[in-house]
Amino acid sequence: IDRASQVLAQGLPLDVPRTYAALLEHAGGDVPPSQQYLTREEKKALIAFLLLISNLGHPV
């Protein structure tokens, strides 16, 4: 099982916000580039798309 799946399976303590950023921070920081699923540009495009559809009232 890969590290990201391990972190998701562990969950978070009750005092930590339930966000992906909190999961990453709780897991110990940055992921090496060889283990990242998306490039920086792909991440930016995905975030922009999700914000757009959210602002239009669609569920994300």
Image: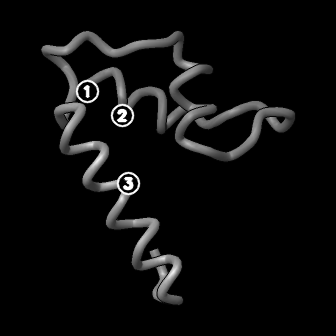
First in sequence: mark 3 vs mark 1: 1
- Of mark 2 and mark 3, the one earlier in the sequence is 2
Number of residues whose C-alpha sits closer than 10 Å to that of mark 3, classed few (under 14), some (14–19) or many (20 or more): few
Query: 23 or 8: nearer the eye?
Result: 23
In this view, the residue farthest toward the bottom is: 57
Residue that mark 1 sits on: 1
Q: Which label lies toward us, 2 or 3? A: 3
Q: Which residue is mark 2?
A: 5
Q: Are marks 3 and 1 in contact (CB under 8 Å)?
A: no
Q: Is residue 6 above or below residue 56?
A: above
Q: Quadrant of the N terminus?
A: top left
Tell me how far mark 2 sits from mark 3, CA to CA: 21 Å
Q: Position of 55 compared to 50: left or right?
A: right
Compare residues 7 and 19 and report the one nearer the observer: 19
Point out residue 16 in the picture as x, y percentages from the top left corner: 77, 33
Residue 29, which numbered label? none
- Name the foreground residue: 12 vs 59: 59
Type of the residue with mark 2 = Ser
Horizontal relation, residue 37 to residue 59: left or right: left
Disc 1 is placed on an element classified as loop
> On screen, 54 above or below 14?
below
User: What residue is shown at x 21% (from left), y 26% (from top)?
Assistant: 36
Which residue lies at the image location 51% right of the left edge and 26% below the top edge? 24
Q: Amino acid at mark 3?
A: Ile
Q: Dots 1 and 2: beta carbons under 8 Å?
A: yes
Judging by the rendered image, the residue that carries numbered circle 3 is: 47
Image x and y of residue 14, in percent: 83, 38
Which mark is in front, 3 or 1? 3
Q: Is residue 4 above or below residue 17?
A: above
Callout 2: 10 Å neighbours few (<14), some, many (20+)?
Answer: few
